[in-house]
Image: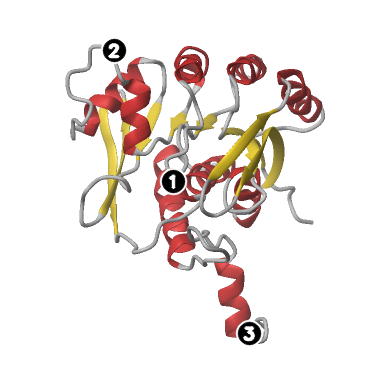
Amino acid sequence: MLQPPPIVLSFAANDPSGGAGIQADTLTIASLGCHPLPIMTAITVQDTAGVEDILPLEPEWVADQARAVLEDMPVHVFKIGLLGSVEIIAAIAEVISDYPAIPLVLDPILISGRGDELANEEMIDAMRELLLPQVTVLTPNSIEARQLSQDEDEEDPKNTDLSLYAHNLLDMGCENVLITGTHENTVQVTNILFDENGVVRSDTWQRLVHSYHGSGCTLSSAIAALMAKGKSIDQSVFEAQDYTWQTLNSGFQPGMGQYIPNRLYKLQLKDAADGTGAPST
């Protein structure tokens, strides 16, 4: 008899394009062999080009969704994406504080790929105060790392020494910080995992030519799923990067905007090898 899959509870917003948000989390978590519990934080109006509007849910609805399934099923890892409001941040922080033994992966979504603001300063302050002290793995890109760790008297907001920002975030309570280098002006993409002792690992990946909608959601959800399967943080981070790069390299452009990661690329490769893929048109 098969063992039941590990369970990952994800807080995220609905994305009708299916590229990011709760849809991205669910696909990623399931494709890596875990059972997703999707807890919606907000409804968005967006497509593959960008986010037009956000309707945050009532915080009680967010908390009640989570508590209902937490009282019913054993959750192995929490994952948090787009939050929607200060009140939702407070509600989620209260829920997860009741389960301190469950690891937490936080993808601090502050702006969209197009540059739409998705978190104001009040929300960023609430993340710093209420969520970061509970985080096991934080997964900001370099822009988000700078913004989250920024002091009001920071002299150089474009400092290229990402370790400075990582240590600021670790000082706020995070156990591990993975800063991704997609937005850095480098030939290849370097992602660096830090803990209180410094650099845990540094991985370099070929920079792909397209821009992608939902890459951060994919990476953070993959880390959560692999941790739920019992892998170490170090190994989870590496394997999640590899999985994410493969989804991007196999990505597709269904609309007029960004490419979407192909989170089912392994299934499609298998179908192609078996000769059971979709007929060409």
Q: Are marks 3 and 1 in contact (CB under 8 Å)?
A: no
Residue type marked 1: Arg
CA distance separating discs 3 and 1: 39 Å
Q: Nearer the viewer, mark 2 or mark 1?
A: 1
Alpha carbon distance from label 2 to label 1: 25 Å
Residue 59 in picture, x, y percent from top left: 71, 19
Q: Is residue 37 left or right of residue 195?
A: right
| Residue 269 falls left or right of residue 176 | right
Q: In terms of depth relative to the viewer, which is nearer, 205 or 239?
A: 205
Q: Secondary structure at mark 3?
A: helix
Q: Which residue is mark 3?
A: 274
Tag 1 secondary structure: loop
Q: Which residue is mark 1?
A: 114
| First of labels 2, 3 by sequence position | 2
Name the quarter where the N terminus is drawn: bottom right
Residue for badge 2? 152
